[in-house]
Amino acid sequence: MKCKIIGKNVAVTDSIKSAIEEKLRRMDKYFIINEDITANVLIRTYKTKQKIEITIFTKMMDFRVEVSEDDLYAAIDLAVDKLEGQMRKLKTKLDRRHKESLGEAIAFENIQNEEDDESDEIVRVKEIYLEPMDLDEAVTRMENLGHNFFLYLDKEDNVVSVLYRRDDGGYGVIQGKR
């Protein structure tokens, strides 16, 4: 797996790069890895905290973690531990639900299209491929990303839907109609 490491307000040294790459190698056992796979790592420094964001894009699902710590190396360790926890949790779910291993279920491909604009209106544009899925799969993917909402194509009625986490608990779904 290739690592694309970007530093904001920090220079990415060889020791930082090697620490990140070494930690990410632990997760190879969960996936079929090839040379086209890229883990995007963003490191930011603030006055009192160090923040690391790791995103791995897969055909079936995206994995993302974001951690802030006082020490950069502690943040790297915690971020990779959280990412590995997400993968183990998904592997268990897939093993129970589909009786197949995660390595057989997920094939990697790097599909990130984004544009960063420094204007006040649109900060980021992200294109996603909407593949048909049922509500349970959408919930699983949203939880894995750690987001409060998830956009997907409903398998039953072929309608673009937004799954979201409600403030009072549970989930809600917004569906578009033509």
Image (tube, rainbow, N blue to C red):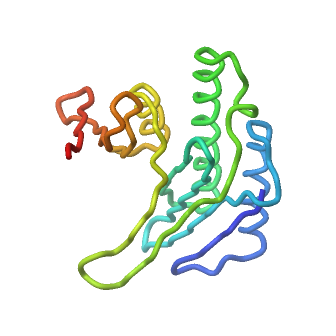
In the current view of this chain or complex, which residue is farthest to the front?
A: 178
The front one of 138 and 134 is: 134
**In the rendered image, the vertical position of residue 66 relative to residue 157, given as above or below:** below
Q: In which image quadrant can residue 54 be found? A: bottom right
Question: Observer-nearest residue: 9 or 53?
Answer: 53
Estimate the x, y position of residue 116 in percent, counting from the top left.
43, 78
Q: Residue at x 59, y 29 (%)?
A: 90
User: Taking 119 as reference, is 37 left or right?
Assistant: right
Q: Position of residue 9 (x, y in %)?
A: 52, 81
Q: Is residue 42 left or right of residue 121?
A: right
Q: Horizontal and vertical percent for residue 154?
A: 37, 35
Q: Residue at x 51, y 65 (%)?
A: 50
Q: In what quadrant of the picture does the N terminus appear? A: bottom right
Q: Is residue 45 above or below residue 164?
A: below
Q: Position of residue 76 (x, y in %)?
A: 63, 55
Q: What residue sits 27% from the left and 30% below the top? A: 171
- For the point 67% across and 76% down, the residue is 12
Say left or right for 95 vs 132. right
Q: Nearer the viewer, residue 51 or 70?
A: 51
Residue 175, placed above or below residue 1: above
Query: Which residue is outermost to the left?
Result: 168
* 16 w.r.t. 96: above or below: below
Of residue 167 and residue 72, the one placed in the foreground of this image is: 167
